[in-house]
Amino acid sequence: MRRLAALMPALMPALALSGCLSAGALENVTQPPKDTPLVTGSVRVIENGSELKWPAGYLAGSQFWLLIMAKDASAAVSYRLGPEAEFYWSLAPGEYHVLGFVKRELAKETSGRLWAAFTVPAGAGTGAVYIGDLRIRLSSSSVDAEVGDNMDSSSTALTEKYPGMGTPKWSLMKMIADQGSYSDIVEGCGGWGIDCNQNFRGVTPLSPIDDGAPSAQVASLSPTLQWAPSKGDGAIRYDVVVFEEIAFTYALGAFSSKLPGPAVAYLQNLWAAQYTVPGPLKPGAHYNWGVRLRRGNIVTAWSRYKKTDFLSAGPSGPWFQFQAPDAE
C-alpha cells in the first residue's frame, strides 16, 4: 500500500465528480443539492447467502467501499457503505462507471472489479435521478453483481427523507459484460499444457517482465506482449485483454490501491503466444493485462500472479502489469 500523498496529483481530476467530496471520497448529502441532481439507489453486499451490514463509523473492524469514476477519468473516488443500503449523491450530469469495490477487515483487504455504467441526464436539473439497486455477491472464488429496478420503493424512501423532492428520473445502471464469448470457465492448471508455478496462476508472462517492480516499463506505445506457450493439444488458442489501470484512495485517504478499469484492447482465438497492442496507448499510463486459454467455447480463468501478500484476500492475485513510455 502506498500513502495518499504520492497519488494526490493523479486524483485531482476525479475530485470534480461531485460537490460533496473530501479526500477522494463520495458522501451522502444531508440536504438536496442546490446546483446538481440528487442521484439515488442502493447497494447491498451478499456473502455466502447472507446480506452483510456495515457500521456508521470507521472504528469497527469490517468496512466496504464502492469505487466510482467519471467516464475517461484516470482515478476513482470511494463511497463507504453505512448502516442504510440507500445512497444519496450529488453528481453533475455526465457518464460514470462503477469501477469495483474494496472490503477491509482490520488489516485484510479484498478488492474486485465490477465495471458498470450509469448516466446522470443533462436535463435532470436539481431533481432526483434513480440509477438502480446494485447487489454484489462475494464468495471465496468469485465476484458477481446485478442491478435491480425497484424505483417505486426508492421513490417512497426518497420522499420520506426529502419531502417535496418529487419522483426521480429513471436512468438505470447497466453491468458491462465480460470480454469475449464463451460457454464455461474452468481452472487452467490441469489439462491445458501449462506449468502453473509458485508465481503465476495460468500462463507465465515472458515480456514485459516487472522483476518485482510495481509495473514493467515498455519501450513502445504499441507494445508486444508475450507469454510461454501451451504444450497441450493443437486445439488450444489464446484470448488476451488489456485494461487501463485506475488508482484510488479510501478510508479518508489512509490507503491507496488500484484496479483494472476500461478495457483498451481484446482479441480472442489467437494461435501465437504473443499480441501487439493497437496503439497508441496513453504516454506514461499504467496498464493491466491477462491471457486465458481457449478450446472452442470453453475458456480458463484469466492468468494472473498468485497472491503473495497474506493481508490480501480474494479469488486471485494481481493482473500482469506494464507502464507505457512517456513518449516514443
Image: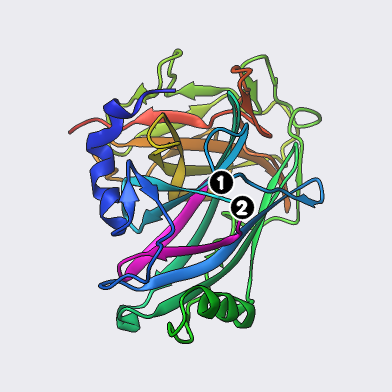
Query: At x 45% / y 36%, what residue is drawn?
Result: 251
User: In the image, residue 152 lies at what x, y percent?
Assistant: 62, 83
Q: Is residue 172 part of the magenta span, yes or no? A: no
User: Residue 284, can we see it?
Assistant: no
Residue 282 location (% of width, % of height): 26, 42
Residue 122 percent coordinates (x, y): 30, 78
Picture residue at 42% right of the left edge, 78% below the top: 128
Left or right: residue 130 compared with residue 244? right
The residue where tag 1 is placed is 56
Q: Is residue 85 magenta?
A: yes
Answer whether labels 1 and 2 touch (C-beta < 8 Å).
yes
Q: How is the image coloured?
A: rainbow
- Helix, strand or loop for disc 1: loop
Q: Which residue is mark 2?
A: 83
**In the drawing, does residue 190 fall left or right of residue 19?**
right
* Magenta part of the chain: 84-100
**Distance between the Cα atoms at labels 1 and 2?**
6 Å
Frontmost residue, 9 versus 31: 31
Q: Is residue 221 visible?
A: yes
| Quadrant of the frame with the C terminus | top left
Q: Sort mark 1 into few (<14), some (14-19) or many (20+) by Cα contacts within 10 Å.
A: few
Q: Amino acid at mark 2?
A: Pro
| Pointer 1 or 2: first along the chain | 1
